[in-house]
Amino acid sequence: MTVQATENVSTSYSQPSDRRGGFYTAKRFGTPLLVIAALGGLLLFLYSRGEPDKIEAFALNWDYMLAKIDEHIRISLFSAIVVALIAIPMGIVISRSKSRIVSAVVLGLANVGQATPAVGVIILLALTFGIGWATAVAALVIYGLLPVLRNTITGIAQIDPNITEAARGMGMRPLQVLFKIELPLAVPVILAGFRTALVFSVGVATIATFINAGGLGEVIVVGLKLTRPAVLLTGAIVVSCIALLLDWLAGLAEDALRPKGV
Amino acid sequence: MANKTGATIELLNVSKVYPNQPEPAVENFTMTINPGELVMLVGPSGCGKTTTMKMINRIIEPSSGSIKIDGQDILTLDQNQLRRNIGYVIQQIGLFPHMTIAENVAVVPTLLGWSKDKIRARVAEMLELVELDPSVFSNRYPKQLSGGQQQRVGVARALSADPPVMLMDEPFGATDPITRERLQAEFQQLQANIGKTIVFVTHDFEEAIKLGDRIAVLSKRSKIEQFDTPANILANPASEYVASFIGEGAALKRLALMRVDSAVESGNATGPAISRDENLRVALDSVVLNAGRPVPVVGGGRVSIESISAALGIDVSRLGQ
Amino acid sequence: MGKYDLSLIWPFFLDKLDEIIELSTEHVLVVLISVLLATIFGVSLGLFAWDKPLLRSASIATAGVILTIPSMALLALMIPTFGLGWVPTLIALALYSLLPIVRNTVVGLREVPEAVMESARGMGMSPLRVLLSVQMPIAWPVILTGLRVATQLAIGIASIAAYVAGPGLGVYIFKGLSMLGAKNALNFALTGTVMIIIIALLFDALFILIKRLTTSRGIRG
Ligand SMILES: Nc1ncnc2c1ncn2[C@@H]1O[C@H](COP(=O)(O)OP(=O)(O)O)[C@@H](O)[C@H]1O
Ligand SMILES: [Mg+2]
């Protein structure tokens, strides 16, 4: 396993997957096993303590939980996809621009953005644009843009200039160089950014419950407000499992999409 | 475009000034390169060889002057069309790591819209040309090849669309000495068959002598100190600068460029026979190994210290030691 | 935006200055303590595990799992055991900060060129000696970057802690939310958020300074 150093908050989450085609790697099986163990343990705990009381029963039933899970995954995936649709083209345009200043400004902004707390963003947005699903999506998107944007720019910038020069020297047009050479080579880094955005999305979506956007944060908040640890634990464990699973799935996609030979 | 004989390249008063640089990197460079000729640009690091070469396929745009290929001003051509007709090999090779060897070699034919069958056949032909077995290497990725093998793929890739012109920037510079010798020998063989017009950049004078039809010795700002055949440069260096570049052992280097043919005299000799196609440096070595006595030549005649000295115009009796 | 009066932000700021300073101090304190805890644990773990492949992978993977858990969820998980307030906040933040610290310690120590290690050993240094006087100084900038990232993470996540009665500027952000529609709501949330950004940037500057002052001139980029 090759581990890379962490350079900033985005890269401290997901790094380009390092699984070299080895199918039987710990991570490929470790994550699902961990999730199964956590959910199994949770179920065992919930059933072993008997019938939930009236207050708990509000949250601890399959219909409610499945609805919350559905809400949570929907908002996370939807935002992550919007992020990809905005940030990847934007990153490409920025890396096309000859001026170093543009990328420097963007990366500088990214640093300030990184210092901005998610809960601040989401609540400020709610105060200005009102609460609800759309505002929550906006917050998730804003928060997820940075890692994908940054990784798109660095993913393209890190390509050996001799490779692109060889491509130009062979008569590829700029768009051909972009689509045949640069993007395929940047894919692992861009996808790592996307994974980070996905993990961010699941996390920020948990906070989105504060502005009435539903999701599993609601389960945690209900457990907190009504002092029912079982409810709180259920919400926390389930949302953690979702984050782990989405990260794992994105990792698999990354392995599948990574160009061979790189 | 399928002309196998290469094209004429004319550079006239070509200069390049990089932005924010006080001095031009190349100044008033003028040179005519004949079809099928292999011209070596040789000079110390930083003298402007690469810049000069890269202006021919407009990877670097000239600041002034004109460059013509077969009479056509390249600045009037579409630069991508131009580049598809110029093979390009750089020291760092620049193979595309996400493409297989076959895909790498197929890039320019694909850009030119060749049919799949034609491309497949061409790729196999090119790999064989550079002595890589297509059945073994086609589906490998660059990182699965040694440096020398990668460099051969680089040459195959540059040749794949049969361009009349090739530009090569220190193509063997990054390989170890033994691999380099092999690649040079193979390349010499290759060029004898394909006859491209080639501009070949190197800082290695030995390589220039070995491979070049003509050598341009360059100094700062790509100034041409001498432009002539290897034998003439060795025999008559135009200046101190060129002489210092040739370094020690010019006479031996010249011997390496002459065939045994030119020094055969009649008479008998004993010892291991030497072929007429060998170079005189090898012949001299044989004579020395034969305790200074003449050695026979295959097909009749012999070579001796005296006959080699006469051919070269210098007494070689002390050289072989 | 008509409901809110942003022109009042300056008077608001002056009016609440004492409280803002107190909350900022709390915020800085909670971050400092938790990152310190994470550093002690994370660097020790890194020093111990860097040359043991299994342990190394296991520690990094575990820390990675923790970081993947949404911050709200991690805070919530602390509550049944540790209750509300400072303690669960400190523990959650320290856990979050682990990954960048462990990972960068391991990478930093491993990145020391084999030739350097070999010559150090060849000169008769003991493994501990090699670690302390050769590897650590060379790995230091990388480890420091890990600390910087950990601090950034902790500063951001600490803002959520207010929801579990934790300390810090998050209090103002949630106050803004709870006053939704009231005149000062935006002032509260904005002050909280901006102060957090300022603290984060100040910490970043501090780390740049520390890096300059403590990195050997020979390896400074
Ligand atoms: N992109 C560039 N920008 C500015 N100066 C350059 C650039 N490329 C090369 N030079 C300068 O131009 C001169 C010639 O460089 P080059 O053609 O690469 O020399 P060579 O190939 O003979 O080593 C050198 O002084 C080099 O520093
Ligand atoms: Mg050069």
Image: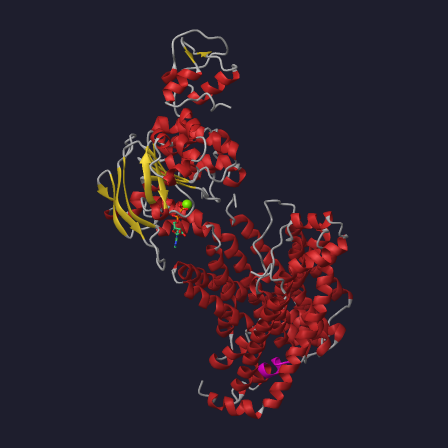
Q: Is residue B114 above or below residue C5?
A: above
Residue numbers of the magenta segment = C168-173
Q: Residue furthest top?
A: B268
- Decide if residue B92 is on the left or right side of residue C176: left
Residue A227 or residue B293, whichever sits in front: B293
Residue B114: give x, y in percent of width and height: 33, 37
Residue B36: give x, y in percent of width and height: 30, 31
Q: How many marks?
A: 0
Kindly identify the residue that appears in the image at 49 percent across and 69 percent down: A108
Residue A90 or residue B314, whichever sits in front: B314
Residue C114: give x, y in percent of width and height: 66, 48
Q: Quadrant of residue B262?
A: top left
| Res B277 visible | no
- Decide if residue C212 is on the left or right side of residue A169: right
Q: Residue furthest left?
A: B71
- Decide if residue A204 is on the left or right side of residue A53: left
Residue B144: give x, y in percent of width and height: 54, 38
| Res C36 visible | yes
Kindly identify the residue that appears in the image at 24 percent across and 38 percent down: B70
Kindly identify the residue that appears in the image at 44 percent across and 64 percent down: A103
Q: Quadrant of residue A222?
A: bottom right
Residue C74 or residue B316, whichever sits in front: B316
Q: Is residue A21 above or below residue B148?
A: below
Magenta part mainly helix, strand or loop? helix
- Decide if residue B19 is on the left or right side of residue C126: left
Residue C76 or residue C189, whichever sits in front: C189
* Residue B180: in magenta span: no
